[in-house]
Image (cartoon, helix red, strand yellow):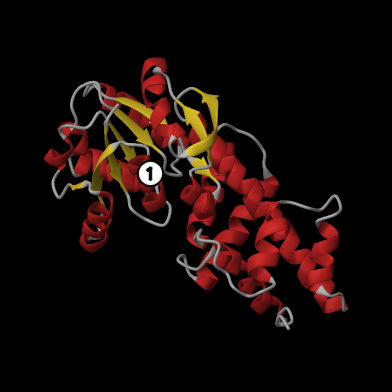
Amino acid sequence: MKTIGFVGLGNMGVPMARNLAAAGFSLVLRDLDPARQEQVAAELAAAAADVPAGFAGVEAVITMLPTSREVQDVLLEWGLAEALPAGAVVVDMSSSSPTVTRELGPLLAERGLALVDAPVSGGVPRAETGTLTIMIGGDDEAAIERVQPVLEAMGERLFRTGPLGSGHATKALNNYVAAACYTAAAEAVLVGARFGLDPARLVEILNTSTGRSFQTETNFPGNVLKRRFASGFALGLLAKDVGIAADLAEAIGIEAPLCELTSRLWREAQEGEGATADHTAAIRHWEKLNGFELPKPS
């Protein structure tokens, strides 16, 4: 593949597109923000598509959008699917609903298009370095093989997860676990600080003990304790992903009370702090509920 479409130039999409350009792919770009679209297109010497016909020459198109709703809108309502040439591959790297992805696959197949779900983990830092973890689901093995070099330009660890929708299911479950770890760490730090423990020392001990996680090793030292709240991943997006995991459990008849509780807590944190707040700022909502704030960093 030589020419790739890319839809969604947000915090993750821009560095991912940069890595594709650096790998030698020609790009056709689309974003709802015209200024951003033109800026990134100029930076990467790429084409900017204001209408679906701008994608007529691509061999694959990547969607990196907030939810399944936006993915469906751009493909079916805006008309991107109709403009793509037969045989093109749609690679949805968004954090989409696995059930919606399975419904979307046959609709695209009717138009001669293959759908691969390939959500990512690693955040903005790994998007910038091209070292994302990518979870790949799909039913068309030939299509997956064709887009493998495209995915390798953005990711370091590529995992085949199973049939269509399995990548999105894996991503939602991963983010549920991440959110649960953050919630547990936040509660522990708040309880400890109220009792008189030094939050920084408590986190240090967690990170040399069995309580460690990505959240305690990365987000608590770098964002929560320093009150930076700048991980690059929005609170609303994490709340949405945990909701997808909870909905999936309900849809397949699995009792998952901790997932349901975590989803509710993050939905409430989103209501309190706003969907666009950094997800590490969720602790501020729980501080307000308790009438107690962590001590400011010295």
Q: Quadrant of the N terminus?
A: top left
Q: In this view, does 148 lie above or below 93?
A: above
Question: Where residue 47 appears, x then y in whole percent?
Answer: 19, 46
Q: In this view, does 227 lie above or below 151?
A: below
Q: Is residue 191 visible?
A: no
Badge 1 amino acid: Ser
Q: Which residue is drawn at 53% across and 48% down?
A: 126
Q: Quadrant of the C terminus?
A: bottom right
Question: Which sits in the foreground, 214 or 176?
Answer: 214
Q: Could you tell me which secondary element the residue under label 1 belongs to? A: helix
Question: Where residue 277 appears, x then y in whole percent?
Answer: 50, 68
Question: Where residue 20 appears, x then y in whole percent?
Answer: 36, 40
Is 31 on the left-hand or right-hand side of 225? left
Q: Is residue 254 above or below residue 128?
A: above
Question: Where residue 115 appears, x then y in whole percent?
Answer: 35, 28
Question: Which sits in the foreground, 10 or 137?
Answer: 10
Residue 203, by quadrant, is bottom right
Q: Mark 1 points at which residue?
A: 68
Is 295 on the left-hand or right-hand side of 20? right
Q: Can residue 22 be seen in this view?
A: yes
Q: Which residue is drawn at 62% across and 74% down?
A: 284
Q: Which residue is drawn at 18% across and 37% down?
A: 55
Label 1 crowd (10 A; few <14 / some 14-19 / many >=20): some
State the count of labels. 1
Is 154 on the left-hand or right-hand side of 172? left
